[in-house]
Image (spheres, rainbow, N blue to C red):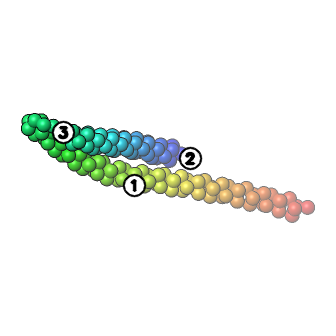
Amino acid sequence: MDTKNRLFIKKKDFEINNLKNEIKELANKIETLEKKISQNIETYVNRENKKFQEPMALILKELFLSTLLKENEYLKREKTKISSILKKKQEELSILLGEKKAFESYLQKKKREKELKENEIENRLANEIFLRNFSNK
Protein backbone atom coordinates (compact mmCIF):
# COMPACT_ATOMS: atom_id res chain seq x y z
CA MET A 1 0.00 0.00 0.00
CA ASP A 2 1.52 3.30 -0.99
CA THR A 3 1.72 6.44 1.11
CA LYS A 4 -1.20 8.12 -0.64
CA ASN A 5 -3.52 5.24 0.22
CA ARG A 6 -2.29 5.06 3.82
CA LEU A 7 -2.88 8.78 4.23
CA PHE A 8 -6.39 8.44 2.80
CA ILE A 9 -7.22 5.68 5.29
CA LYS A 10 -5.70 7.66 8.18
CA LYS A 11 -7.76 10.68 7.15
CA LYS A 12 -10.91 8.55 7.17
CA ASP A 13 -9.96 7.12 10.58
CA PHE A 14 -9.47 10.65 11.91
CA GLU A 15 -12.86 11.77 10.56
CA ILE A 16 -14.52 8.66 11.98
CA ASN A 17 -12.99 9.22 15.43
CA ASN A 18 -14.05 12.87 15.41
CA LEU A 19 -17.61 11.90 14.53
CA LYS A 20 -17.66 9.23 17.22
CA ASN A 21 -16.54 11.82 19.78
CA GLU A 22 -19.20 14.29 18.61
CA ILE A 23 -21.83 11.57 18.85
CA LYS A 24 -20.75 10.75 22.41
CA GLU A 25 -20.93 14.43 23.37
CA LEU A 26 -24.40 14.81 21.85
CA ALA A 27 -25.62 11.65 23.60
CA ASN A 28 -24.29 13.03 26.89
CA LYS A 29 -26.08 16.33 26.27
CA ILE A 30 -29.33 14.49 25.62
CA GLU A 31 -28.88 12.47 28.79
CA THR A 32 -28.23 15.65 30.80
CA LEU A 33 -31.34 17.30 29.33
CA GLU A 34 -33.45 14.24 30.16
CA LYS A 35 -32.20 14.33 33.76
CA LYS A 36 -32.97 18.05 34.01
CA ILE A 37 -36.47 17.52 32.60
CA SER A 38 -37.21 14.74 35.07
CA GLN A 39 -35.86 16.87 37.92
CA ASN A 40 -38.14 19.72 36.86
CA ILE A 41 -41.12 17.39 36.72
CA GLU A 42 -40.30 16.04 40.18
CA THR A 43 -39.89 19.57 41.55
CA TYR A 44 -43.14 20.63 39.90
CA VAL A 45 -45.06 17.75 41.46
CA ASN A 46 -43.55 18.39 44.89
CA ARG A 47 -44.32 22.11 44.78
CA GLU A 48 -47.79 21.61 43.38
CA ASN A 49 -48.67 19.31 46.26
CA LYS A 50 -47.63 21.85 48.91
CA LYS A 51 -50.44 23.85 50.44
CA PHE A 52 -49.82 27.54 50.88
CA GLN A 53 -52.20 29.74 52.83
CA GLU A 54 -50.89 33.22 52.08
CA PRO A 55 -51.90 34.82 48.76
CA MET A 56 -48.35 35.98 48.04
CA ALA A 57 -47.02 32.45 48.55
CA LEU A 58 -49.68 31.11 46.17
CA ILE A 59 -48.73 33.68 43.52
CA LEU A 60 -45.02 32.85 43.86
CA LYS A 61 -45.83 29.14 43.69
CA GLU A 62 -47.79 29.64 40.45
CA LEU A 63 -45.01 31.76 38.96
CA PHE A 64 -42.43 29.16 39.90
CA LEU A 65 -44.50 26.34 38.44
CA SER A 66 -45.15 28.19 35.19
CA THR A 67 -41.42 28.94 34.93
CA LEU A 68 -40.66 25.25 35.40
CA LEU A 69 -43.14 24.34 32.66
CA LYS A 70 -41.60 26.88 30.25
CA GLU A 71 -38.12 25.62 31.05
CA ASN A 72 -39.24 22.06 30.39
CA GLU A 73 -40.67 23.05 27.02
CA TYR A 74 -37.39 24.76 26.15
CA LEU A 75 -35.41 21.70 27.28
CA LYS A 76 -37.63 19.42 25.19
CA ARG A 77 -37.05 21.59 22.09
CA GLU A 78 -33.30 21.51 22.73
CA LYS A 79 -33.43 17.75 23.13
CA THR A 80 -35.27 17.44 19.81
CA LYS A 81 -32.69 19.65 18.05
CA ILE A 82 -29.78 17.71 19.50
CA SER A 83 -31.46 14.41 18.64
CA SER A 84 -31.80 15.44 15.00
CA ILE A 85 -28.15 16.55 14.92
CA LEU A 86 -27.17 13.25 16.53
CA LYS A 87 -29.09 11.30 13.89
CA LYS A 88 -27.34 13.23 11.09
CA LYS A 89 -23.94 12.59 12.69
CA GLN A 90 -24.71 8.87 12.95
CA GLU A 91 -25.66 8.83 9.27
CA GLU A 92 -22.40 10.63 8.40
CA LEU A 93 -20.50 8.08 10.47
CA SER A 94 -22.08 5.15 8.68
CA ILE A 95 -21.25 6.75 5.32
CA LEU A 96 -17.62 7.30 6.34
CA LEU A 97 -17.32 3.75 7.63
CA GLY A 98 -18.75 2.50 4.34
CA GLU A 99 -16.32 4.61 2.32
CA LYS A 100 -13.38 3.36 4.35
CA LYS A 101 -14.46 -0.26 4.05
CA ALA A 102 -15.04 0.10 0.30
CA PHE A 103 -11.61 1.67 -0.18
CA GLU A 104 -9.93 -1.05 1.88
CA SER A 105 -11.77 -3.70 -0.15
CA TYR A 106 -10.61 -2.00 -3.35
CA LEU A 107 -7.02 -2.03 -2.12
CA GLN A 108 -7.28 -5.71 -1.15
CA LYS A 109 -8.68 -6.52 -4.60
CA LYS A 110 -5.85 -4.63 -6.30
CA LYS A 111 -3.31 -6.41 -4.09
CA ARG A 112 -4.78 -9.83 -4.98
CA GLU A 113 -4.81 -8.94 -8.68
CA LYS A 114 -1.17 -7.89 -8.49
CA GLU A 115 -0.24 -11.11 -6.70
CA LEU A 116 -2.14 -13.15 -9.30
CA LYS A 117 -0.33 -11.37 -12.14
CA GLU A 118 3.02 -11.98 -10.45
CA ASN A 119 2.16 -15.64 -9.95
CA GLU A 120 1.02 -15.87 -13.57
CA ILE A 121 4.31 -14.39 -14.77
CA GLU A 122 6.29 -16.75 -12.52
CA ASN A 123 4.27 -19.71 -13.81
CA ARG A 124 4.85 -18.71 -17.45
CA LEU A 125 8.57 -18.31 -16.84
CA ALA A 126 8.69 -21.68 -15.08
CA ASN A 127 6.79 -23.29 -17.98
CA GLU A 128 9.13 -21.71 -20.53
CA ILE A 129 12.18 -22.90 -18.62
CA PHE A 130 10.66 -26.35 -18.28
CA LEU A 131 9.80 -26.49 -21.98
CA ARG A 132 13.31 -25.31 -22.96
CA ASN A 133 14.90 -27.91 -20.73
CA PHE A 134 12.51 -30.62 -21.94
CA SER A 135 12.98 -29.75 -25.64
CA ASN A 136 16.79 -29.69 -25.30
CA LYS A 137 16.80 -33.33 -24.24
* Residue 69 x %, y %: 20, 46
- Side of 61 where 102 appears, left or right: right
In the picture of the structure, the residue carrying the numbered disc 2 is 1
Q: Which is more toward the observer, 71 or 103? A: 71
In the picture of the structure, the residue carrying the numbered disc 3 is 51
Quadrant housing residue 64: top left
Q: Nearer the viewer, mark 3 or mark 1?
A: 3
> Residue at horizontal 40%, vertical 51%?
90
Pointer 2 local density, CA inside 10 Å: few below 14, some 14–19, many at least 20 = few
Q: Amino acid at mark 1?
A: Glu
Which is nearer the N-term, disc 1 or disc 2? 2
Q: Work out whether 104 lies above or below 65.
A: below
Residue 133's mark? none
Q: Secondary structure at mark 1?
A: helix
**Which quadrant holds the C terminus?**
bottom right
Q: Is residue 4 visible?
A: no
Q: In the rendered structure, are the residues bearing label 1 and label 2 in contact, judged by CB atoms less than 8 Å apart? A: no
The alpha-carbon separation of the residues under discs 1 and 2 comes to 29 Å
Q: Which is more toward the observer, 60 or 135? A: 60
Quadrant housing residue 30: top left
> Residue at horizontal 44%, vertical 42%?
17
> Residue at horizontal 23%, vertical 45%?
72
Q: Residue furthest left?
A: 55
* Residue 20 x %, y %: 42, 44
Q: Work out whether 25 lies above or below 131.
A: above
In the picture of the structure, the residue carrying the numbered disc 1 is 91
Q: Secondary structure at mark 3?
A: loop
> Residue at horizontal 23%, vertical 42%?
49
Q: Which is more toward the observer, 27 or 124? A: 27
Q: Secondary structure at mark 2?
A: loop
